């Protein structure tokens, strides 16, 4: 096994670690119910540094993390969510609409930390490598960073909820980010009020697990 | 702390686990140099089941994993990569072109396992929840599944390389997948020939780490 000079020995992961990692994946959850407890800024800063270890196309590192803190910015995002959620509800009928209306779909009011995560489409980093035929790889790189942060947060006992019932252009405007930044994720972060092994949308009869999607196809 | 009946106690993650998880993120790597050793199909099947624990918008579970096994299918993908890579090289000039030409950008010839990962845009699962204003969330859900698989594979001592220098429509045609399946990732999987703490694109002077992207912005 070759390795670079001065990099230390590559880690060997054992059964104990793999079992705990499986627990992490299984208990991750999309969290919408938070305790009001504040989270130390240093923890969030460390999570962002960890997220930046995620893979990125051409090593382009296109993620941009914004902590949304002012009441005025948060209120704009909350109003945006409420409008989009009302519009979404209006698309359902009967029993589906009733179930949708009963779902808690964001923790925007309660979460002590709001993180908006953007993809910088103006970056020169990576010099376009790996993006010519699949330009969406730049956005995908940001998704991997978000997922890295999510897992690291859960390992710290923090819950993360990804809110996508938002008009992304309005969020960009409200946060006055550079024009080439595209909103990829809006995250609520905080101590979870509850912990569950099953997704909230399974528990509340919105969408069951689909076992056939766990299967490998062959060609 | 509330929890659902019969779910077992939520796991408590400790410092030891967090340190190992940090190692996993740090040593993950995009692998393009593989040993020829075969990988047990049961390991790949387990990795796909783990990937299906990833988050998905509306619990839509839109990932579709295809193991590409026949020489004819693999040859079409390899030829596709070679054509796209030649076209990409032609876009660079001088020193950049020389550096691009020297990079090893896929392990398609050596990797014992090829996984094509698709997003099923025809799925009804999730009933559209969370996708009305950000329809890209469906593809992002597949990216999170890919990243879950990547981390789980590394914990098993397996390397994963994501090849995006491909014409995705041609890959769909070659693998004869349903028309609503969109290619999100083409992965090479196998035992890594080398292990490194630094990304190959940093080591080979393509793109350095950008420390400012690890920083949190505030609004």
Image (spheres, coloured by chain):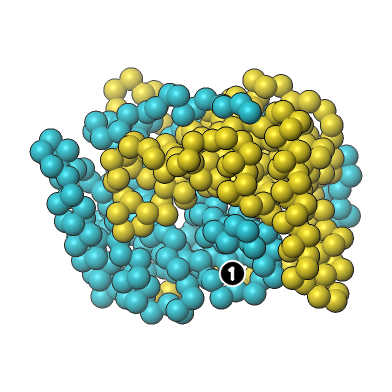
Chain colours: A cyan, B yellow
- In this image, A11 relative to A55: left or right? right
Q: Residue at x 72, y 28 (%)?
A: B70
Q: Which residue is mark 1?
A: B213
Comparing B10 with B200, the one in front is B200
Comparing A61 with A84, the one in front is A84
Quadrant where the C terminus of chain A lies? Answer: top right
Place of residue B59 in the rendered image (x, y in percent of width and height, measured from the top left): 36, 38
Q: Residue at x 82, y 70 (%)?
A: B97
Q: Residue at x 26, y 48 (%)?
A: A105
Where is B173 relative to A38, above or below?
Answer: above
Under tag 1, what secondary structure?
Answer: helix
- In this image, B37 relative to A159: left or right? right
Place of residue B199 in the rendered image (x, y in percent of width and height, measured from the top left): 75, 56
Residue occupying the far left of the picture: A94
Where is B82 relative to B181, above or below?
Answer: below
Place of residue B198 in the rendered image (x, y in percent of width and height, measured from the top left): 76, 56
Chain of the residue displaying label 1: B
Comparing B42 with A103, the one in front is B42
Residue B143 can be seen in this image: yes
């Amino acid at each position: 096994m070759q390795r670079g000079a001065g990099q230390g020995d590559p880690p060997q992961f054992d059964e104990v670690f793999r079992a705990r990692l499986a627990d992490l994946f299984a208990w991750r959850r999309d969290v919408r119910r938070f305790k009001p407890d504040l989270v130390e800024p240093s923890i969030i800063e460390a999570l962002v540094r960890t997220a930046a270890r995620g893979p990125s196309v051409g090593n382009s590192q296109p993620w941009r993390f914004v902590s949304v803190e002012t009441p005025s910015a948060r209120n704009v995002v909350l109003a945006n969510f409420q409008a989009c959620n009302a519009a979404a509800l209006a698309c359902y009928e009967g029993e589906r609409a009733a179930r949708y209306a009963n779902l808690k779909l964001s923790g925007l009011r309660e979460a002590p930390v709001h993180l908006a995560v953007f993809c910088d489409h103006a970056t020169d980093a990576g010099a376009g490598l790996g993006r010519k035929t699949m330009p969406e790889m730049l956005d995908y790189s940001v998704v991997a960073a978000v997922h890295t942060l999510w897992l690291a947060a859960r390992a710290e006992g923090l819950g993360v909820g990804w809110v996508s019932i938002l008009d992304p252009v309005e969020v960009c405007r409200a946060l006055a980010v550079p024009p080439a930044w595209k909103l990829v994720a809006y995250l609520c972060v905080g101590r979870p009020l509850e912990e569950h092994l099953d997704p909230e949308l399974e528990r509340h009869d919105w969408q069951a697990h689909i076992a056939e999607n766990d299967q490998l196809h062959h060609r």
